[in-house]
Amino acid sequence: MSHEIESVLINGRPVIEAIYANRPAWHRLGVVFDEGGSRGMTSRQAIELGHLGWGVEKEEIQLVSDGTKAKGFYGLVRQDTRRTLAVVKERYTSLQNVEAFEFLDSLLMDGIMQYEAAFALRGGEEVCLLARMPSFDWVVPGEDLNMRYLMLSMSHGYGGIRLLPTALRVQCANMQRMALAEGKADTYVIRHTGDMESKLELAKKYISQLDKKFTGYNEKARSLLVGCTQEQRAAYLAELFPAPSEKASTRAKNNHERSIQAVKNAWHRPAQQLKGVKGTWWALFNAVTEVVDHDKPSRQSKNEERARERRWMSISDGDGASFKDKALEVALAMAL
């Protein structure tokens, strides 16, 4: 399963360790908080309703052959399910789920941090928290809104703790990887060794600078709010969707025509008709990303969940993610 959110057996009861604010995730798993509303969750609500209050501890590893201990190595054991999440060394320092929430809560001095999503992956090997930041960006004032999120991705084992800004509503493992890939240059990593408290204090200084990161992306978006002629649209689409050769198969030629037509259809949809957006490079770029995210046809499947997974694998890990990066780069270059 590409979302990697599992059903965990706790006290004989299967539990999905995931919660989302206001609307369901694409995979339809987990709990929805304030469905149809607009409120974010507090840390307490996310922990309790998302079943994320469990902890981990290092436990000595006993070799099966003769009963001796594996010196210097420990099993990192989830305390409620007794599942070994990783094998770690003595210097490894755990950050508990509750402590991770407390850390994010401490970032806002004037109120409680609002959470958009919280979930565990692969039975607890990783925990991902997505917090709403208090500010947001209008690409077009009053019309086109970009949310600002802070993602904390914590590995119980290898990989450390990663903090990064993102505009994505992260809901699963694939979207987590997509956010990490897109925000690689802006990711702050905390290793599970040494004084964890002092490391978290340093991380706060990094997070205080995040507004500049979001502002940079918003400036790129605003630079695309310029008119785009029919000739420019044609040149842009030709760059993104090169015409097949005369010797190409009929299928390849038909696929090319369908791709071009799909973007043209998306160009006329309501989201691209907003005041200040209509007729701009920003509308054209969003038409392309809309096609990649929502219109790309997938193979027929009797299993709806598997079909959704295939779509997200393309969007987040495969051709979809790199194609959207290229679409933005080309739009910025051609809009000058």
Image (cartoon, grey):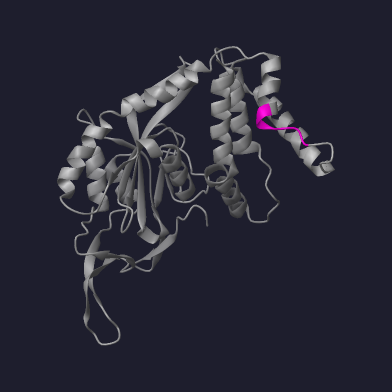
Task: Residue at 69% x, 43% y: name it.
Answer: 297
Residue 93 lies left or right of residue 52; in this view the side is: left
Residues rendered magenta in the picture: 239-244
**What quarter of the picture does the C terminus occupy?**
top right
Between residue 303 and residue 77, name the one nearer to us: 77
Between residue 9 and residue 4, name the one nearer to us: 4
Q: Could you say where residue 230 lies in the image, as x and y percent from the top left? A: 70, 15
One can see residue 231 in this view: yes
Which residue in the rendered view is the most extreme toward the bottom? Answer: 66
The answer to whether residue 328 is above or below residue 307 is: above
Q: Could you say where residue 208 lies in the image, as x and y percent from the top left? A: 25, 29
- How many numbered discs sit on the rendered protein? 0
| Chief secondary structure of the magenta portion | loop
Q: Could you say where residue 191 lies in the image, as x and y percent from the top left? A: 26, 50
Between residue 317 and residue 44, name the one nearer to us: 317
Residue 280 lies left or right of residue 105; in this view the side is: right
Q: Could you say where residue 189 lies in the image, as x and y percent from the top left? A: 30, 44
Task: Residue at 41% x, 42% y: name it.
Answer: 180
Task: Residue at 22% x, 43% y: name it.
Answer: 102
Task: Residue at 38% x, 36% y: name it.
Answer: 185
**Is residue 242 magenta-colored?**
yes
Write down the quadrant of residue 81 in the picture: bottom left
Residue 200 lies left or right of residue 236; in this view the side is: left
